[in-house]
Image: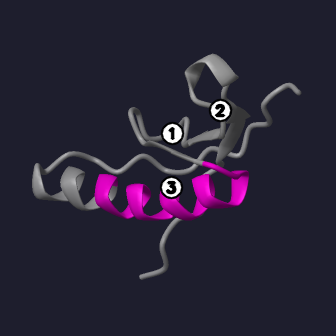
Amino acid sequence: MARPEYRIVIEPLREEDGGGYLAYVPDLPGCTSDGETDVEAVQSLHDAISAWIFRAQSLGMPIPEPTRSRVPA
């Protein structure tokens, strides 16, 4: 079974918050990651997505389908 492709949002973090980037998946509540660069944040987020789905399955929770709506820039 192919892994669903979820929309990822990337935002820069303020220097006061340590800098770098935050990446998250709006369809998966609490599924976030960060990194020094946007690429690192997304790479780490892929592991977080897998862990989120595994945990939800182990708890018998439904896995949300990816939405295809656009986020305003």
Which region of the structure is painted magenta?
Answer: 36-52
Which residue is depicted at the point 35% across and 51% down?
Answer: 63
Say whether disc 3 or disc 1 marks the residue closer to the N-terminus: 1
Q: Which residue is mark 2?
A: 19
Q: Secondary structure at mark 2?
A: loop
Q: Secondary structure at mark 1?
A: loop
If you read the primary sequence from the N terminus, does the residue marked by circle 1 or circle 2 appear first? 2
Picture layout, residue 30 above or below residue 57:
above
The vertical placement of 23 against 11, above or below, is: below
In this view, 60 is above or below 22 = below
**Residue 73 circle label:** none
**For residue 24: magenta?**
no
Single out the mark in the foreground, 3 or 1: 3
Which numbered disc flags the more N-terminal residue, 3 or 2?
2
What residue lies at 66% left-to-right and 28% top-to-bottom? Answer: 13
Q: Quadrant of the N terminus?
A: bottom left
Position of the C terminus by quadrant: top right
Q: Quadrant of residue 54?
A: bottom left
Residue in front for this viewpoint, 24 or 39: 39
Tag nearer the camera, 3 or 2: 2
Residue type indicated by callout 2: Gly
